[in-house]
Image (cartoon, grey):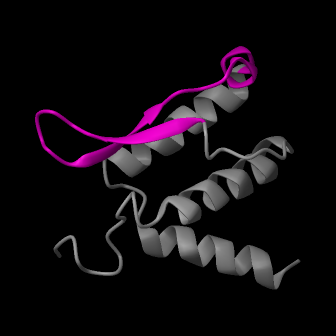
Amino acid sequence: MNDTEPDILQLTRDKEIIDEYFSLIVKDELDISMNFSNEYIITENIVSKKQILVKTFSDFIRINSPLYFLLQALIHKINSGILRRAQMTKALESFREHQ
């Protein structure tokens, strides 16, 4: 697979999907409704030259340990390639169907 294939998460292109996925998972796991678009930035790893998510968590997230660790885990999964675009879109579609 290469970066042009649809299952590869391209952070800049897929930011809205990432934001919506974070909101869905946090709502499902912790029953917290929140917009996460300003809780991280997209930047380039200076060693690998790949785009990564870097947390810029607000005080609300930093003092809420379960939320902090959940978001940290999601960001790690995205940065390490464990969480794929197809998984995220499938979860979002499933959620929309059951609303």
* Residue 44, horizontal then vertical, whole percent: 24, 41
Residue at the spot 64% in from the left edge and 51% down from the top edge: 22
Residue closest to the far left: 47
| Location of the N terminus (image quadrant) | bottom left
Would you say residue 56 sits in the magenta stretch? yes
87, 18: nearer the viewer? 18
Residue at the spot 35% in from the left edge and 76% down from the top edge: 7
Give the residues in magenta.
39-64
Q: Quadrant of residue 83?
A: bottom left
- On screen, 80 above or below 89? above
- 76 on left or right of 48: right
27, 20: nearer the viewer? 20
* Residue 51, horizontal then vertical, whole percent: 28, 48
- On screen, 11 above or below 69? below
Count of numbered badges drawn on the protein: 0
- 81 on left or right of 21: left
* Residue 59, horizontal then vertical, whole percent: 70, 17
Residue at the spot 26% in from the left edge and 80% down from the top edge: 5
* Residue 11, horizontal then vertical, whole percent: 39, 57
- On screen, 12 above or below 3? above
Residue at the spot 34% in from the left edge and 64% down from the top edge: 10
Would you say residue 40 sits in the magenta stretch? yes
Q: Quadrant of residue 31?
A: top right
- 4 on left or right of 99: left
- 28 on left or right of 66: right
| Location of the C terminus (image quadrant) | bottom right
- On screen, 78 above or below 94? above
